[in-house]
Image (cartoon, rainbow, N blue to C red):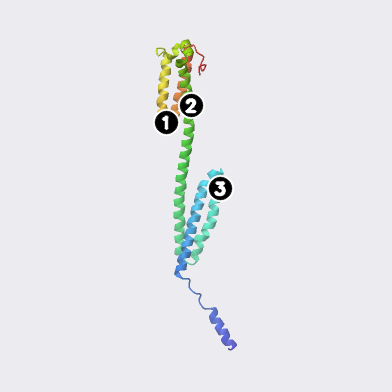
Amino acid sequence: MSKAAFDGGWTQASVRPARAVPREVQKMVFLVLAVLVAAVAAATVWLAATRPRRENDPDAAFWYAFTGLCVLLPLVLVPATANKAESLWLLAVAATSALATHRLAHRSRILAEAEHRRAVAAGALAAVTEAHRTLLARWGRYELDPAASIDFPAMTDVRVPETQALIRAVTAAAATQRDAMLGVGPDDGVAGYRRSVAELAAALETAERAAGSTPGAWR
């Protein structure tokens, strides 16, 4: 073979068009990119929405968003060099995934805050209930203890104004306790229950002083 013929054959071979990528391979690559885009967008939004509160760092949201965009933008923009339609589809996938994740994170935050409020209310209710029980036991001693009953008969005499006020306070505390147990009213009823128990404590102390007893002596 002559040198000219060899050079001509080499030149034709060098400019031979590249084999087209099969359509199935293109679809598979697009699906993989779509999954990656959706995952990166979801992870970015979730981390930016939830981690700053846990880490107690307001700047963390910016850095999570910045890092996620650095990964996401090439995945969305690079395919535009070959097929702008695919790039637009990937952008739509990213936006949909981000929006869905944002809604999920918002709902999760609301549920977490509600659970925290319930936990705080349960702790407050337990404390007020214990104080209520202690006051009732303190008043009950004047009836159940023979010595206290003899020494301070006014504590069980409903004709005494202070004792009448005490009984009304006991009734009111019992009513607000039921509301608190059912979670009825502002602050799940705990605020009203706490107020009634405080009024019961004041009424009991007043009744004890009126009867000649030292407040809190009979427990």
State the image coordinates of residue 45 (x, y, percent, origin top left).
50, 51
57 or 149, which lies in front? Answer: 149
Q: Is residue 185 visible?
A: no
Circle 3 residues within 10 Å: few <14, some 14–19, many ≥20: some
2 vs 3, front mark: 2
User: Answer yes or no: do the residues labelled 2 and 1 have beta carbons within 8 Å?
Assistant: no
Ranked by sequence position, the earlier of labels 2 and 1 is 2
Q: Residue at x 41, y 25 (%)?
A: 174
Please tell me whether residue 31 is drawn above or below residue 182 in the rendered image: below
State the image coordinates of residue 190 (x, y, percent, origin top left).
45, 30
Residue 130: mark = 2
Residue bearing mark 1 = 181
State the image coordinates of residue 53 (x, y, percent, origin top left).
53, 43
Q: Circle 1 — which element?
A: helix
Q: Residue at x 40, y 19 (%)?
A: 168
Circle 1 residues within 10 Å: few <14, some 14–19, many ≥20: some
